Amino acid sequence: MGSFPKLFEPGRIGNVELRNRIIMPAMGNHWAEDGYIVQKQIDYYVERARGGVGLVTTEACCVHLPEGKMFEQTSVDDDKYIPGLGKLAEAVKKNGAKISIQLGHAGAAATLKLTGGLMSVGPSAVRRSGYEQVRALTVTEIKETRDYFIEAATRAQKAGFDAIELHAAHHYLLAQFHSPAWNERNDEYGGNIRNRARLTMEIVDGIKNRLPEMPVICRFNGTEYGTEEFFGTPGLTLEDALEIARLAETSGADAVHISAYGWGTEKTRNIPTSAGALLHIAEAIKKAVSVPVIAVGRLLPEVGEAALREGKADFAAIGRGLLADPYLPQKLLADDVEGIAPCITCYQCMGEPRMNICSVNARSGEEGKYPHPMPKAPRSKKVIVIGGGPGGMEAARVAALRGYKVTLYEKEEELGGKLLVADKPSSKENIGLLKPYLKRQLEKAMVKVELGHEATVEWVLAQHAEVVIVAIGAKPTRPNIKGLEKACVVDALELLAGKAEAGNKVVIIGGEMVGCEVADGLSELGGKEITIVRRGTGLMTETRVPRLRYILLHNLESRGVKFELGVTYKEANENGLVIKDREGNEKLLEADTIVLAAGAQPDTRLLDELKGKIPEVFSVGDAIEPRQILHAIHEGFKVAYSL
């Protein structure tokens, strides 16, 4: 058990014995086809079972189509889905883990697009910001919904699942019944918390009466955050959650799984960036019940171990950490903590259209396509990687693991590339975990690293390499603005790196992620007048994670950052930047510092000159097109894997 004896202590939920106390919680993957399980999902869950978790939990499975549809999810509302679910359950159990199915109903979180035009349903007929109009369920319909859950649980038992988890958390139907922000009823399903929790408890009781040997886990919110800000109404409190926990135990639940949910600027409470951020809630509930308590919320191994040791919880649910590294449990058991790929809380796994994609793990969701362990190449080749950013480091790591002789050349005196500044914006400090991890993996794979070496075409050709992977990144775009050389101009990345400073009147040219993050950091300091300008009419239009855009823009607006969008640049001078605004008015934006965050262009010179002169030459990351860490890592992995 090494350094984590509590995490690897056998555990029990109901009559089910688990090999350890690490649980993979439900994470929606959106991969099901017409509700049916597909092989991609089986590969994904089996990978985590092989990795050593005690219990695998499926994504939320829909108990009633179409009104209950949360997303393009697995369904369990008809017997026709049992064979596919059975195949999944059997595959996971063959690989040493137990498997739980999560059952859920969207309620007000459904959309007309998902339901085929049917209005979403909920406890009350409300219209909340960010949601569509809701129709209130009648008492008869509530009883029918209870039966949908019970029938779904029966199908899950037939499919061979070891346990049932009720999704009464986040912003879905059962959680809506619990929450005063959604539930305005004045009958037996509304009012006090016992009434608001009645439907959940009827489901727990109904499943246990129908399937007395089947363990039931009740997952619910310990607190709701941001309801006053986003909805203008109070939400679920910890006191409410304590009563839900007691009611769940009385109704027959075999364990409780404590989550939380937030709206608005509190949205990141759902997946916190700070380790153990929700542990205080689990600890409070642990004192109120005698059934096992499952904690969640960035439970890094040492945090989870301490929580179990100190009696704050009985099981540790690790979600995004298992996306980043499915073999996390195995590595913990071997005391190889430094070998665990870190979750960097970038939230790319929550972006549309592809969920559960992971910036640091290119295999997440493609386990069948890229088997583990990595296959060795039929013969070794001499491989040169040029550029030590995330794409280059990943390409070098994977190529070396495949058996190639790899040398990585970086022109700077330090590896990292954009990683050297990516963790500077507020709330992005966890990105800083990636660079030391990749450096350790290069050492472990025996990649030769040459720093302070800028590769030229002539030098590369003289190395007689069979494969060259170009990962030299991109060059900042310098806008063609008259007089820019007369102004005090700094590059956004130099500012983030601490190599430049900004004055008290700042104009930022560029309104995508980098420009807004610079404005966020500067506005946090206070005492500065900041204006973001761009030719386009929107801000952060390229981000695939809406929650990040909302929070960042809210921060900027609340701190008085000004925006000038849809502008034409006229000229820059020692006094600032002259623009023509969207109404056609010409004006001077006073600035003692102009920050350039207008994007970047791929540096293709080296690649272009090497083509046709090297047997195999590839480009990855920003050298193809300036994008995010995810793209660099994935391209580096896939190029090296395919050699």
Image (tube, rainbow, N blue to C red):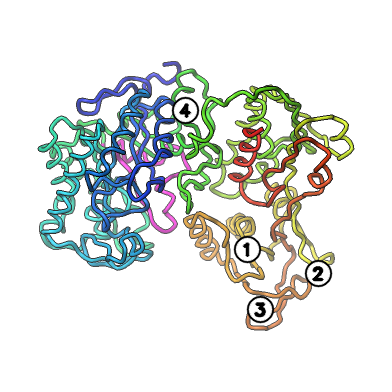
In front: mark 3 or mark 4? 4
Q: Which residue is mark 3?
A: 581
Q: Is residue 99 above or below residue 629?
A: above
Say whether marks 3 and 4 touch (CB < 8 Å).
no
Using residue 280 as the reference point, say whether residue 552 is left or right of it: right
Magenta part of the chain: 257-285
Q: Position of residue 75 (x, y in %)?
A: 29, 47
In front: mark 1 or mark 4? 4
Q: Position of residue 619 (x, y in %)?
A: 71, 43
Q: Is residue 101 magenta?
A: no
* Residue located 54% across and 32% down the image: 341
Mark earlier in primary sequence (4, 2): 4
How crowded is the residue under tag 1: few (<14 C-alpha within 10 Å), some, or many (20+)?
many
Q: Is residue 506 visible?
A: no
Residue 405, quarter of picture: top right
Mark earlier in primary sequence (1, 3): 1
Q: Is residue 270 magenta?
A: yes
Say whether marks 4 and 2 touch (CB < 8 Å).
no
Using residue 138 as the reference point, say whether residue 336 is left or right of it: right
Residue type, numbered disc 4: Leu
Say whether marks 2 and 3 touch (CB < 8 Å).
no
Q: Is residue 523 above or below residue 391?
A: below
Mark earlier in primary sequence (3, 4): 4
Q: Secondary structure at mark 1?
A: loop
How crowded is the residue under tag 2: few (<14 C-alpha within 10 Å), some, or many (20+)?
some
Q: Which residue is mark 4?
A: 328
> How far, Cα to Cα, is label 1 from label 4?
38 Å
